[in-house]
Amino acid sequence: MKANVGGIDRILRGVAGVALIVLAVMGIGTPWTWLGVVALATALISFCPLYPLLGISTCKKTAA
């Protein structure tokens, strides 16, 4: 797995993931709020499985 989630994207996913998980634990929202686990996981591992399918990468290009 090559990293495809960059800095700002990781931060936004992490914050959104934690917020959704907190809402789910508190019982606020719907069962869909547990999708925050996916957002948090993709932020932690810097890889989104949907991005390669769409041809997207938010990582900075490295000079070869």
Image: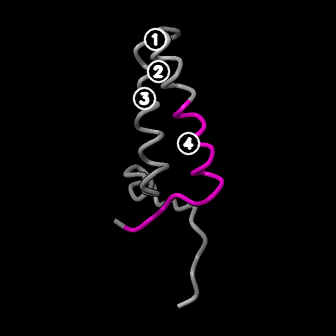
Regarding mark 3 in the picture, which secondary structure is present there?
A: helix
User: As rendered, which of 5 and 18 lies closer to the eye?
Assistant: 18
The residue singled out by tag 1 in the image is 30
First-in-chain label (3 vs 4): 4
At label 2, counting other C-alpha atoms closer than 10 Å, the crowd grade (few under 14, some 14-19, many 20 or more) is: some
The residue singled out by tag 2 in the image is 33
Q: Residue 33: percent from the left, percent from the top?
A: 47, 21
* Amino acid marked by disc 4: Gly
Q: In this view, does 47 lie above or below 60?
A: above
Camera-near label (1 vs 4) is: 4
Which residues fall within the magenta stretch?
A: 2-18
The residue singled out by tag 3 in the image is 35
Cα–Cα span, label 3 and label 4: 12 Å
Regarding mark 2 in the picture, which secondary structure is present there?
A: helix
Cα–Cα span, label 3 and label 1: 10 Å
Camera-near label (2 vs 4) is: 4
